[in-house]
Image: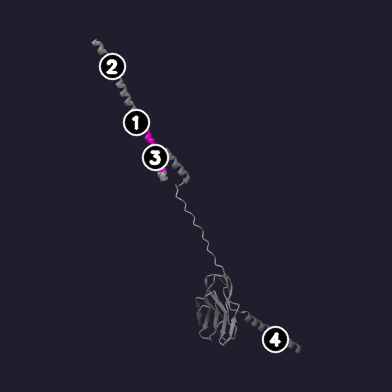
Amino acid sequence: MRIRSTLARFAACTVLGWIALGGVSAFASAHAEFESTSVTATSTTQVVLDVPHERAPNVFNTTVRIQIPSGWSAPTCTSPAGWTCSSSSGEVAFFKNDPRSIINSSEAFRFALSAPASTGTTTFPVAQIYDTGENVLWSSSAQLQVTPAQTPTTSAPQPSPSPTTPNSPPTTTAQSESSNAGSGTDGGSSASTALSPDSSKTVTLQADQTDDSAGAHSTSTSDGAPIAAIVVAVIIVIIVGGVAFVLARRRCR
């Protein structure tokens, strides 16, 4: 009987000791940590820091102070219910209005952080102060990783297509216009207007030269016919006059 009671006591002490060690390890595993552990470089992000309460129920958390490392800034903070907060260049602090008010097992503190341009992991030391005056320093658990900012990609604007005649490519139209211009028809006149001014002058000048040469030819032809007729008439008059003169002398003899 004594052996059995001794074994029972030993087993009970072992179970209680295991539970006690488990409870201590559970408290020891809690840390002051950010809910989201990454932010983007050069951005301003709202972060939430969870701070555990690891003391007896009659001990209360009264102050939480977060150190802001160099290169970072905390422009604003948000007070939880029953708290007030302040934000400066190097620290964000939260103060409980009623130090002995009931709290949960952990509390969340929200504030804005502006990240630097450099990437990497940054640690934010956290000081937790209880109403007993005890200070707990979380020196390495609250960390944020800065990730590179994504560079926006822009596509080059596509050139707008030049207006063309439907179902007629520009090359075919140009060839047709140049052909009409060479033919000297009405279509050629409109084609020369679409070309450069120098080309238009050249086409017009060639047409004028052609018309002038044709006119000169027709004038010389029409003027030559009257001249020949006059010459012939003069010759005939001279011959007739000569014959009449000779006949008149013979009669006189």
* x then y, percent, for residue 99: 53, 86
Rendered position, 241 above or below 146: above
Q: Position of residue 211 (x, y in %)?
A: 37, 35
> Is 203 colored magenta in this rendering?
yes
At x 55%, y 81%, the residue is 65
Left or right of residue 7, residue 222 in this image: left
Q: Tell me the quarter of the image containing the C terminus.
A: top left
Q: Which residues are magenta?
A: 199-217
Closer to the camera: disc 3 or disc 2?
2
Label of residue 13 in the image: 4
Mark 2 — residue?
242
Amino acid on which the number 3 mark rests in the picture: Leu
- Where does label 3 land, which residue? 205
Q: Residue at x 63, y 81 (%)?
A: 28
Helix, strand or loop for disc 1? helix
Residue closest to the eye, 205 or 249: 249
Residue 130 forms part of the magenta stretch: no
User: In the rendering, at what x and y percent does residue 120 appear?
Assistant: 59, 71
Per the model, the C-alpha gap separating discs 4 and 3 is 123 Å
Q: Quadrant of residue 209?
A: top left
Task: Identify which amino acid the numbered label 1 is placed on.
Answer: Thr
The residue pinned by badge 1 equals: 219
Look at the numbered disc 4 and give the secondary structure of its residue: helix
Q: In terms of depth relative to the viewer, which is nearer, 181 or 243?
A: 243
State the predominant SS element of the stretch in magenta. helix
Q: Amino acid at mark 2?
A: Gly
Residue farthest to the top, as pictured: 253
Of callouts 4 and 3, the N-terminal one: 4
Distance from disc 4 to disc 1, alpha carbons, whole Å, reads 143 Å
